[in-house]
Amino acid sequence: MKGDQSKAEFDAVIVGAGFSGMYMLYKLRKEGFSVKVLETGDDVGGTWYWNRYPGARCDVPSMEYSFSFSEKLQREWAWSEVMAGQPEILGYANHIADRFDLRRDIQFNTKVTTARFEEKLGVWTVSTESGEDFTGRFCVMATGCLSVPNTPVIEGADKFSGDIFHTGFWPKEGVDFSKRRVGIIGTGSSGIQAIPVIAETVEHLTVFQRTPNYTMPAYNKPLTEEFRQKAISNYPEIRREQRESIAGIVGYGFGFGGAENIEPEDQILKTTAEEREKLVEAEGFAAIRRYLDVQIDPEANELACEMYRSQVSRVIEDQQVAEKLMPKGYPIGCKRPVIDTNYYETYNKKNVTLVDLRQGGIEEIAANGIQTAQGFYEFDTLIYATGFDAMTGALERINIEGRSGFKLKDYWAAGPRTYLGLQISGFPNFFTITGPGSPSVLSNMLVSIEQHVDWLAELISYMTKHQYSTIETSSAVEDEWIAHVNEVAQGTMFTAKSCNSWYLGANIPGKPRIFMPYVGGVGEYRKKCDEVAAAGYEGFSLRS
């Protein structure tokens, strides 16, 4: 152990055993530090442990949604599909835990309730629901950005007499939907993935849609061994491009469809209505990915929206249903892109009913269904596909106290404040992996996780080598970083007036509206972090 054993039981206590917690454990342990990981679930995997709903799938190509820190790991794991499904990704997480013997330092079935900084001792005490205390010089929150399911408050919800499920907290044993009549609330990413799969076996499925979403076909398919080996041989270049890119995704031959070679002159505002129509006929939804100006020009974006709606009308047989499914009133790109497999085609099935809540919302949930302003819809099983309290939800559900008992929840009352998405003023030696103010959910999460963990491991080693006891940022530095985060987001569709997304916390009633992720890109963010480290951790105060 490198820390002072008289003061701290461990060098670091990590909360969460998803990909970020596992890699943080691996990295610190390799550097000789003592580490304890505390995990609510009974095994590793994080979001892929909890999100077992039918159709759950990653929206990043599997060959790129993987770690690069181990050459052997890169070569030995064989992904089966372009876009891996939840069972395979969870299998990958378990393989990592087994390969690097991580479980011996992870305590499962352990819910953290409090993390408190002990100023006199210079340590963090992390307390659990069962009454255990763990102390460490450093406290690392690897709690994930999408880990706290959001269940809306609806009148009569407790009266429903049938089975109730949430996509973000799915039973490990799965659910047999045959002969069931199911109602599902929500058409975000999880709903769009689950609906087509559930519709295959149910007696009837009723979909309650509040806001139609923009979703693109996944173009998923099996990976051939030839392609896998070619990608593996090209990994050095792929990884370099990932780290320098905007979103941490190269799309190396992975078949997103339609837009592999966009040129600067490709602008939708330079096209004619006839040209756009022909392109939609030829390429479908992928046609809108051909233009660079769609993400920065509202007029260009609306033309792309028209192309999108035109394709919806082509896929949906009943034009009244098609009209209900057409997103209107907000731009493409203001919300996280969604990918799907036969989502729209599902609404051509006779056992699927779409309820457009824009035409009359939910009034109450009854014992056997939902009463809306449009009428009553009966079913025996209810599913919430209503997303997450994103970015800050997991952190604010733990009582985190910094200097002088200052509570994180109070400090973030007007919205999250961080420096680089990594640290918070008043909370020394406390770190958030992929926290608000970093690329996180706007990127390939494994690329961002790897960058954050590598950076933090180097920092902790640096502090130990130079005998620094604490590191802390300031509110003035946070102000500068928050201003920069908002500055780079301006002029994009993410901050359009008509955009209400979970990036802004708009899906949680009463949550402060502040744009949380960093839009500047994975590559530019990495440069900034490297510059901070090279300048002796500029923006942080290091104390002996």
Image (spheres, helix red, strand yellow):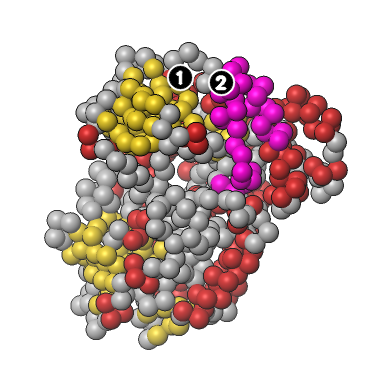
Mark number, residue 345: 2
Mark number, residue 352: 1
Query: Is any part of residue 201 visible from this angle?
Result: yes
Task: Choose top left, top right, bottom left or bottom right for residue 462.
Answer: bottom left
* Amino acid type at mark 1: Val
Task: Choose top left, top right, bottom left or bottom right for residue 287.
Answer: top right
- Residue 182, position as x, y percentages in the image: 35, 23
- The quarter of the picture where the N terminus appears is bottom left
- Magenta-highlighted residues: 306-335
- Residue 417, position as x, y percentages in the image: 46, 69
At a point 35% along the width and 37% down the height, the residue shown is 363
Q: Residues within 10 Å of mark 2 (few under 14, many from 20)?
A: few
- Residue 43, position as x, y percentages in the image: 28, 43
325 within the magenta span: yes
* Amino acid type at mark 2: Glu
- The quarter of the picture where the C terminus appears is bottom left
